[in-house]
Image (cartoon, rainbow, N blue to C red):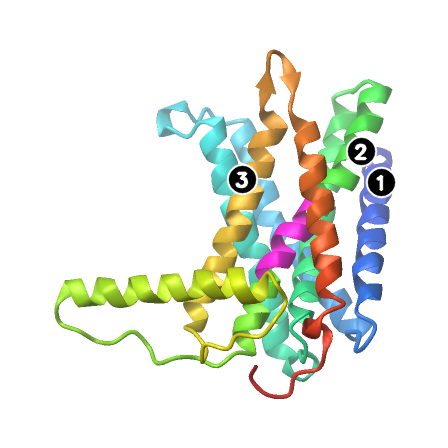
Amino acid sequence: MDIQKLTIAFFLAIIPALIWLFIYYKKDKLDPEPKKIILETFIIGIAMSFPFLFLRYVMIYIDLNPLFIGETISMILFAVLEEVAKLSTAIFVVTHHKLEFNQIIDGVIYAVTAALGFAFMENMFYLASLQSFGTNILDFIYIVGFRSLGTMFAHTLFTGLAGLIWAYAYFSKQISPFNKKRLLSFELKDWFNHEILSLHIIRQNILKARPSRRGGHEKKVLVLEGMMLAFFLHIIFNLTTELEIFGKSMTFLLVPMLIGGFLYISYLFTKRMNTKILKVV
């Protein structure tokens, strides 16, 4: 790949990533995370993108029809795997820097940082490829703008919400594990009750920025629910970018979704989730 084109793509990708990182980082005014750990999270997020970039590159030159993997299915699969990779990055960093992880909102900061590292590398190679194909300059500018203000921003929202729910579970009490019943019906009932409790906590407590008063919950189930929320939003975003009705792109529908998501996360930084936590909530 041409070094000059790669250099141009690098700056076009890194500048918006750093701007978004600065915006999120400055919102945590009470107890900002150490810059060294933020940089570490960003770099690991970059590293996590390489397997996906390699897989995308391979898929371009492989006929997937015999494998029954269509474009829509691959889009959904990538959305799920990417969210797992980004949140896993945040969790990995926190396990090595637990003393710095003392606010629920820190889950958003680490998750967003990992997402920006991932999105930066993805955008850089995507923009470098566009230059290689000789894309029209106006189309290239539009794509740069969309990926900087749309795709990269969307990465921060999806993973940021998953990070929020993960952090909420991290600082919360945990109810007893699933009861070990012999009868399958009882096991299913226990599982269903945990699912209902987790959804209730997400809807009534996390999304409204207030602590749980129901005595805790099963942490793993709640984290899974958060990841499923990120999967759903990411898949909707991907499908909308490809959706056309009467030959018209429906990408504009993403604008209120992105603005609303940013306003909501900004709201969270003003609530109790932006206070230090030294014990379970």
The quadrant of the picture occupied by the N terminus is top right
Q: Residue at x 45, y 80 (%)?
A: 215
Look at mark 2 in the image and give the residue it sits on: 144
Vertically, is 139 above or below 92? above
Tag 2, which secondary structure? helix
Where is residue 243 drawn, in percent x and y? 58, 24
Q: Residues within 10 Å of mark 1 (few under 14, many from 20)?
A: many
Hey, what amino acid is under mark 2? Val
Would residue 55 be found to the left or right of residue 186 on screen? right
Hey, what amino acid is under mark 1? Leu
Q: Picture quarter containing residue 24?
A: bottom right
Q: Residue furthest top?
A: 246
Q: Residue at x 41, y 73 (%)?
A: 218
Q: Residue at x 59, y 16 (%)?
A: 245
Q: Picture quarter containing residue 171?
A: bottom right
Would residue 134 be found to the left or right of residue 178 on screen? right
Q: Which residues are magenta?
A: 154-162
Report the predominant secondary structure element of the magenta stretch: helix
Vertically, is 160 above or below 3? below
Q: Picture quarter containing residue 47?
A: bottom right
Q: CA distance from mark 1 to mark 2?
A: 7 Å
* For marks 1 and 3 on the same chain, the one whose residue lies earlier in the sequence: 1
Check whether the beta carbons of the residues at disc 1 and disc 2 lie within 8 A of each other: yes
Find residue 12 and name its label: 1
Find residue 26 and name its label: none
Hey, what amino acid is under mark 3? Ile
Count of numbered circles in the view: 3
Tag 3, which secondary structure? helix
Between 268 and 229, which is closer to the camera in this rendering?
A: 268
Look at mark 3 in the image and give the residue it sits on: 235
Where is residue 72 drawn, in percent x and y? 48, 29
Q: Residue at x 68, y 45 (%)?
A: 154
